[in-house]
């Protein structure tokens, strides 16, 4: 019975299951250890298990491990299919006074932001492994990659702006609002005048 429930969770979550999901389903958590020892599950991080036959989702695992992190800048572009470069290092934004422990063990570049802007434009999107992860919306991401401190490279910015100009569901009003907030209105206007 419990094995069937775990199989259903694995199927519903693209081959991945967390200790929290097991607890919520009322399944004895000791079964995770038993299945891991039997080679039927693989523990990929604290509280995260995958079906060894299925490819693991690094972005989901990082999101699970560092729940306050929101995928940021070039990593957000990748999640929105606005760049063809897969990130070698993931960029994550955290609240200003939050310091995630042991994050230096992972390929993550940490950013911190004041609370007034930290949640602005955050949304859920599907990772390449088809799990929901938090990132910023397209309009916020365009502003983030243009900000002078640690700005993205020119080729990435150009590719993202061209991609945005071709989107059917782009929100120019929201882009303008965010550009005001992040002081990049002139740069955004320059790109949009050329591309739209």
Image (cartoon, helix red, strand yellow):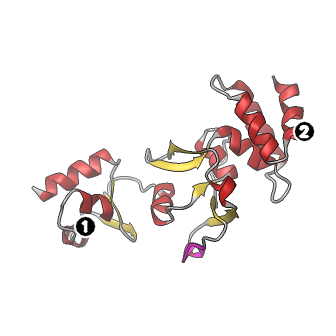
Which residue is disc 1 drawn over? 39
- Nearest to N terminus: mark 1 or mark 2: 1
Mark closer to the observer (1, 2): 2
Q: Which quadrant: the N terminus?
A: bottom left
Do the residues under discs 1 and 2 have CB atoms within 8 angstroms? no
The residue sitting at 30% across, 45% down in the picture is 12
Q: Please identify the quarter of the rendering in which residue 57 is found.
A: bottom left
The residue sitting at 81% across, 38% down in the picture is 158
Q: Which quadrant: the C terminus?
A: top right
Pick the residue in front: 168 or 183: 183
SS category of the residue bearing label 2: helix
* Chain part drawn in magenta: 99-104
Pick the residue in front: 183 or 80: 183
- Please say whether residue 100 is one of the residues in the magenta stretch: yes
Q: Position of residue 114 (x, y in %)?
A: 69, 61
Q: Please identify the quarter of the rendering in which residue 84 is found.
A: top right
Q: Is residue 49 left or right of residue 94?
A: left
Q: Pick out the residue farthest to the front.
A: 116
Majority SS type along the magenta span? loop
Q: Is residue 42 left or right of residue 31?
A: right
Pick the residue in front: 132 or 105: 132
The residue sitting at 20% across, 72% down in the picture is 30
Q: Position of residue 67 (x, y in %)?
A: 49, 62
Q: Position of residue 8 (x, y in %)?
A: 22, 48
Give the answer, above or below, for where 84 lies relative to 62.
above
Give the answer, above or below, for where 97 lies relative to 151.
below
Return the mark for residue 131.
none
Pick the residue in front: 122 or 8: 122
Q: Position of residue 18 (x, y in %)?
A: 33, 61
Which residue is disc 2 drawn over? 186
- Please say whether residue 17 is one of the residues in the magenta stretch: no
The residue sitting at 21% across, 67% down in the picture is 35
């Amino acid at each position: 019975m419990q094995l069937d429930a775990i199989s259903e969770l694995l199927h519903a979550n693209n081959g991945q299951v967390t200790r929290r999901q097991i607890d919520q389903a009322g399944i004895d958590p000791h079964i995770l250890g038993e299945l891991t020892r039997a080679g039927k599950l693989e523990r990929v991080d604290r509280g995260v298990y995958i079906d060894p036959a299925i490819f693991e989702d690094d972005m989901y695992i990082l999101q699970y491990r560092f729940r306050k992190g929101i995928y940021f800048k070039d990593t957000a572009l990748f999640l929105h299919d606005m760049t063809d470069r897969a990130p070698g290092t993931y960029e994550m934004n955290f609240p200003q006074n939050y310091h995630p422990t042991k994050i230096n063990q992972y390929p993550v570049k940490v950013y911190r932001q004041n609370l007034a802007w930290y949640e602005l434009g955050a949304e859920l999107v599907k990772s390449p492994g088809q799990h929901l992860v938090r990132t910023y919306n397209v309009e916020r991401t365009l502003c983030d990659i243009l900000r002078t401190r640690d700005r993205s490279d020119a080729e990435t910015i150009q590719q993202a702006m061209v991609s945005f100009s071709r989107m059917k569901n782009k929100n120019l009003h929201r882009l303008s609002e965010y550009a005001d907030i992040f002081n990049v209105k002139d740069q955004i206007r320059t790109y949009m005048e050329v591309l739209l």
